[in-house]
Image (spheres, rainbow, N blue to C red):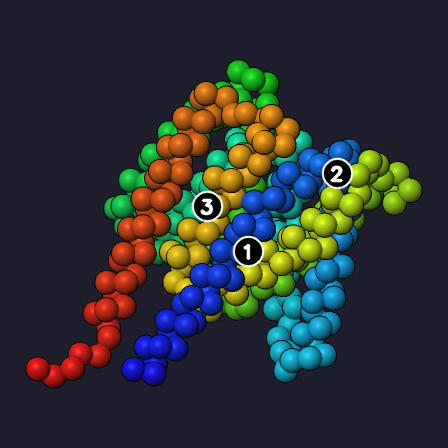
């Protein structure tokens, strides 16, 4: 009985932590746009601030806890960190070259890419339900990309698709390694920082009309959001955590519409609706399957 009460308490804690992280992540792109900065200036500044926040968090863990895990665990950790850095750059460029709705809808394809790569690279064959969701999402992405071709923002859509592909590769490598990579995305922020500074010619060339918004984003929002979302799996199942990542897909375009009047195009909205529907249906199926498996493993009282 006591174990059941503790499990319920841990589950509630996990829901609160992960929901908070997911909500924080939804304001990432609006804060980037509110800074009013030039693209590479934003890339360099946001990366540097996130890296600084990661250093502070890491130092705090070393000082006040017994955690002594390496920040970058071996060659695999280094590869994952570099890939996160590349994904951060392509993500930021996509922010400036396509609409927020198109970006988050295409990024939502990441779980399906990860399922496909898991099959190809580590032999984890997806279930038929996953294949069905993939087909629907490919159709949705095709609508968004074709709309981008007509609107002239094909570069941004391509960068969003590339980012989704790299993130799915990171997930697959991390799963195969079975090693903690919690700090990898935060410490990887030094990569876009260095690249951005090289391109603009140094810190003196940074152009940020409203730096306060970017400071809020890089120093607080991104570190807290990723920490919460990385902590969620300690208390929740994978499908439950994945559901909270959908908050950005759903809410980020809403914030952009309310703040900047950036409304999705008709085709983009239809494609996004198809992607979200497929993702939600797939996540609910995963959650149901996980709960059935958990119940089947639970000890039964003799009759």
Name the quadrant of the N terminus.
bottom left
Q: In this figure, which residue is indicated by the disc labeled 3?
A: 246
Residue drawn at x 57%, y 30% is 257
Name the quadrant of the C terminus.
bottom left
Residue drawn at x 17%, y 79% is 300
Name which quarter of the figure residue 7 lies in. Answer: bottom left
SS category of the residue bearing label 3: helix
Residue drawn at x 24%, y 73% is 297
Task: Tell me, yes or no, if residue 108 can be seen here.
Answer: yes
Q: In this figure, which residue is indicated by the disc labeled 2?
A: 35
Q: In this figure, which residue is indicated by the disc labeled 1?
A: 21
Distance CA(mark 3)–CA(mark 1): 12 Å
Q: Nearer the viewer, residue 179 or 133?
A: 133
Question: What is the residue that sits farthest to the top in this orientation?
Answer: 150
Question: What is the residue that sits farthest to the right in this orientation?
Answer: 204
- In this picture, residue 275 sits left or right of residue 78: left
Q: Position of residue 128 (x, y in %)?
A: 25, 46
Name which quarter of the figure residue 61 lies in. Answer: bottom right
The relative height of residue 202 versus residue 118 in the rendered view (above or below) is: above
Would you say the residues marked 2 and 1 are in contact, meaning their CB atoms lie under 8 Å apart?
no
Would you say the residues marked 2 and 3 are in contact, meaning their CB atoms lie under 8 Å apart?
no
Q: Position of residue 298 (x, y in %)?
A: 24, 75
């Amino acid at each position: 009985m006591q174990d059941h009460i503790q499990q319920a308490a841990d589950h509630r804690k996990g829901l609160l932590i992960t929901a908070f992280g997911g909500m924080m992540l939804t304001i990432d792109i609006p804060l980037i746009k509110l800074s009013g900065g030039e693209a590479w200036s934003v890339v360099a500044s946001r990366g540097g601030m996130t890296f600084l926040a990661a250093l502070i968090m890491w130092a705090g863990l070393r000082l006040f806890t017994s955690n002594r895990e390496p920040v970058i665990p071996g060659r695999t950790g280094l590869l994952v960190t570099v890939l996160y850095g590349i994904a951060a750059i392509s993500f930021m460029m996509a922010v400036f070259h396509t609409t927020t709705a198109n970006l988050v809808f295409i990024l939502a394809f990441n779980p399906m890419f990860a399922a496909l790569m898991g099959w190809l690279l580590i032999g984890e064959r997806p279930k038929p339900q996953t294949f069905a969701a993939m087909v629907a999402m490919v159709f949705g992405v095709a609508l968004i990309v074709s709309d981008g071709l007509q609107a002239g923002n094909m570069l941004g859509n391509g960068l969003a698709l590339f980012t989704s592909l790299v993130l799915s590769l990171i997930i697959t490598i991390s799963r195969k390694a079975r090693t903690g990579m919690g700090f990898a995305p935060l410490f990887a922020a030094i990569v876009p920082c260095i690249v951005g500074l090289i391109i603009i010619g140094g810190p003196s060339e940074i152009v940020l009309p409203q730096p306060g918004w970017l400071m809020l984003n890089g120093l607080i929002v991104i570190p807290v959001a990723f920490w919460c979302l990385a902590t969620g799996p300690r208390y929740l199942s994978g499908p439950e955590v994945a559901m909270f990542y959908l908050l950005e897909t759903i809410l980020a375009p809403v914030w952009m519409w309310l703040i900047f009047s950036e409304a999705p195009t008709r085709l983009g909205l239809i494609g996004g609706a198809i992607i979200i529907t497929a993702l939600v249906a797939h996540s609910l199926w995963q959650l149901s399957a996980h709960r059935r498996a958990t119940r089947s493993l639970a000890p039964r009282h003799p009759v």
